[in-house]
Amino acid sequence: MLQLNYIRDHKEDVLKRLAIKNFKDADSIITTVIDLDNNRKTAQKQGDDIKAEANVLARQIGELMKTGKKQEAEEMKLKTAELKNTEKVLDEKLKKIEDDIHKLLVTVPNLPHVSVPLGKTPEDNEVLREEGTKPTLYNGAKPHWELTTQYNIIDFELGVKLTSAGFPVYKGKGARLQRALINFFLDRATAQGYMEVQPPILVNEDSGYGTGQLPDKEGQMYHVGIDNLYLIPTAEVPITNIYRDVILKESDLPVKNCGYTPCFRREAGSYGKDVRGLNRLHQFDKVEIVQIAHPTKSYETLEVMRDYVAGLLKELELPYRILKLCGGDMSFGSALTYDLEVWSAAQERWLEVSSVSNFETFQTNRLKCRYKDEKGKTQLAHSLNGSALALPRIVAALLENNQVEGGVMIPKVLVPYCGFDRIN
């Protein structure tokens, strides 16, 4: 959530940067927020003046009572009662204004970083670099959804029987490959100084609000109505919320956590050939990395996190590219996002496998995640997170890119984790 003081002091900059995110209602909402804040200040001053007047009267009543002037004291008590009623009305007015401001602020996306490119669709994203050699497949090579059936390692139809489409069942070497990737990603993260946590996969409304999923994305999350809990769309939600209402020491920064969880997304409105097989699921596994960073170092941290994810793709011998997302393709809460995509040889297209984002103070303002600087002043920290990595499209690319006649070869780095070097 944007800070109100910044909106007041930098209205034109806020509107300019929101335009990069193609936020259509920016002018009316920001103007209304500022007008409401002016009303809030007026009501606050009126309330403070009344409280001050009531305090003066209280002292005068005490003096009158001491000197025996009970009649005058009683008249002042009546005036004090009137002031109390007015104060109550003003308090209710102030609360409503503050509620109205908050309802508007939570609809406003984060401001994009100055380096974010203009654009409205993924086609407008900026390709920063491309690494690796795209494999040349043998004649008769297949997409992963056919390979998984051929080698009986992922059963999409059984998932439909048990749940519905988008909930595959991993079997045999497919299940072991999933477990191998999870352990590989966690081992690499802990070696880089991330503390592993195993968070809940159900969160409450406060947690969803804290990281910006609520009220923006409730339609994309699975809701357990009877308990009013949400299945997590990513481990970012519970891990970042660990630091909700926490004041850290400046020396604690950066805080680095990683965690594996299943993730759940309704993906409403996703149809067509691009969502076939593992390309888009309702339940999938992912290892997430999260950092709470010092504001002056968060963009340096973002670059390090991005390059760390790229290093994982290199180890897996997957051709990849890094994109800087344009304003129109960024998430609601992100200030700057890098996407990493791997090349899918059988589908002949790029598949997104990671987003690494800096949220600056957008989440921490909601979370009240702060630190005390060297002067003892409380400041908002910056929050960052990234997929490191999401498994489905990694598996899709591994199967397609490494297929040979009669099997699929396992990248060398995964063999010790899998216990086999070939799927056949």
Image (cartoon, rainbow, N blue to C red):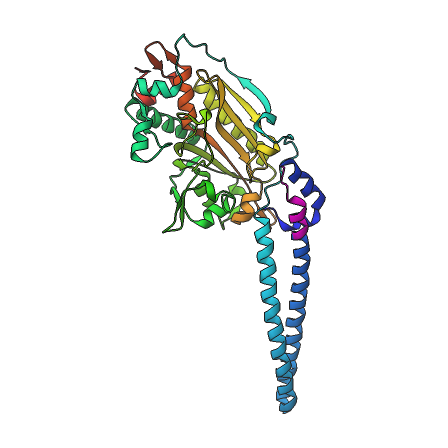
- Estimate the x, y position of residue 69 in percent, counting from the top left: 65, 91
Q: Residue furthest right?
A: 12
Left or right position of 227 against 117: left
Quarter assignment of residue 37: bottom right
- Is 239 positioned to the left or the right of 41 in the image? left
Q: How many marks?
A: 0
The spot of residue 219 in percent (x, y) is: 47, 43
The part of the image, by quadrant, that contains residue 333 is top right
Which residue is more in the foreground, 158 or 415? 158
Image height of 414 relative to 289, above or below: above
- Residues rendered magenta in the picture: 22-32
Residue at 39% x, 23% y is 395
Q: Can residue 8 be found in the magenta stretch?
A: no
Q: Position of residue 185 (x, y in %)?
A: 41, 28
> In the figure, is residue 215 to the left or right of 60?
left
Q: Residue at x 59, y 42 (%)?
A: 109
Front residue of 280/294: it is 280
Q: For the stretch drawn in magenta, what is the main secondary structure?
A: helix
Q: Can I make out residue 240 in this image?
A: no
Q: Residue at x 65, y 56 (%)?
A: 36
Specify the farthest residue to the left: 172
Question: Where 313 sits versus 163, above or below?
Answer: above
Horizontal and vertical percent for residue 413? Answer: 39, 19
Q: Is residue 216 or residue 420 the one in the foreground?
A: 216
Question: Can residue 160 be seen at all in this image of the molecule?
Answer: yes
Q: Nearer the viewer, residue 248 or 58?
A: 58
Q: Quadrant of the C terminus?
A: top left
Above or below, 424 relative to 309 = above
Asked if residue 25 lies in the magenta stretch, the reply is yes
